[in-house]
Image (cartoon, grey):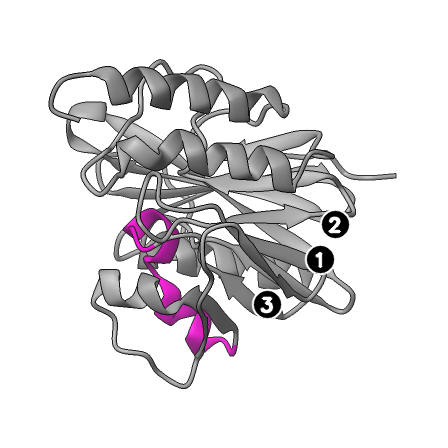
Amino acid sequence: MMNWRVWTILVNWGLVGVAAPVSETAVEVEVTPLAHGVWLHKSWQDAGEWGRVSSNGLIVREGDHLVVIDTAWGAEPSLLLLDWIDRELGLPVNRLIVTHFHNDRLGGWEVFAERGARVIASKRTLELAEVEPTDAFDLYELNSGETMMSGSMEISYPGPAHAEDNVVVWLAATKLLAGGCAVRAAESNGMGNVADATISEWANAMRRVQHTFPETERVLPGHGAIGDFEMIQHTIDLAEEAAKSPGD
């Protein structure tokens, strides 16, 4: 039987490995099982006008190793996450798949590379993040609507939406789609951070996701609660409304 325990890992900056209450200087990571061999990892940062915001990623078992989809939110939380993986799962992280260039997806990639993980990212992601490629990266290029396999997972570039380079990742075995920040949670009533967004194309990008992965049963957004396939249509509706707004 699966252990549905939720792990919350707390440390103070400068006291890595020491449990501590949540504070303004605390680093917090939470891990929750979603399915057999699949865990949600969640981390937090203060995000200005949005307050304290959580960010979602995945840990996926793939045979004798693990794949992580998106870093925790920064280097310190990513280190904390990897230490938890070593302690609780005891399997190496073979790959880190990055869904776009923002710090809640890519921040801390160096920590993964130092542990021997290959970093799977698009060439455009590194260009936008102004990160110089190293031997740790496996880079790719996809046009809108194209997909590629990475082990058991399918990476799809639906086109510009939340960011120019955002991709989604399909886990066929569990019919779970990691939507990253291109997908808005069901509880969201707006588009969130649109500093690097292409509002006019966001709805079209999500329609490509609908068409490419119609068997999806669950969708994990970059922020907020996991939901069902209707979350994609919800994002389309929000994007269409945002595209009508002056100045977008």
Residue 114 falls inside the magenta stretch: yes
Amino acid type, label 2:
Gly
Q: Secondary structure under badge 3? A: strand
Count neighbours of disc 3 (C-alpha within 10 A) and say few if under 14, some if 14 to 19, many if 20 or more. many
Q: In the rendering, at what x and y percent does residue 26 appear? A: 30, 42
The residue located at (52%, 32%) in the rendering is: 207
Q: Give the Cα separation between the discs numbered 1 and 2.
A: 5 Å
Q: In the rendering, at what x and y percent does residue 36 appear? A: 78, 44
Q: In the rendering, at what x and y percent does residue 241 appear? A: 32, 15
- Which picture quadrant has residue 23? top left
Residue 93, label in figure: 3
- Residue at the limit of the structure toward the left, as seen here: 247
Q: Give the Cα separation between the discs numbered 3 and 1.
A: 9 Å
Of 33 and 142, nearer the camera is 142
The residue located at (62%, 36%) in the rendering is: 211
Contact (Cβ within 8 Å) of mark 1 with mark 2: yes
Query: Is 124 on the left or on the right of 18, as rendered?
Result: left
Amino acid type, label 1:
Arg
Amino acid type, label 3:
Val
Q: Which quarter of the rendering shows the C terminus?
A: top left
The residue located at (58%, 57%) in the rendering is: 147
Counting residues from the N terminus, which is met first, the one under dot 1 or under dot 2? 2
Q: Secondary structure under badge 1? A: strand
Q: Give the Cα separation between the discs numbered 3 and 2.
A: 13 Å
Q: Residue beneath label 2, please?
A: 37
Q: Residue beneath label 1, please?
A: 61
Q: In the rendering, at what x and y percent does residue 84 appear? A: 55, 55
The span picked out in magenta is 101-116
- Which picture quadrant has residue 231? top right
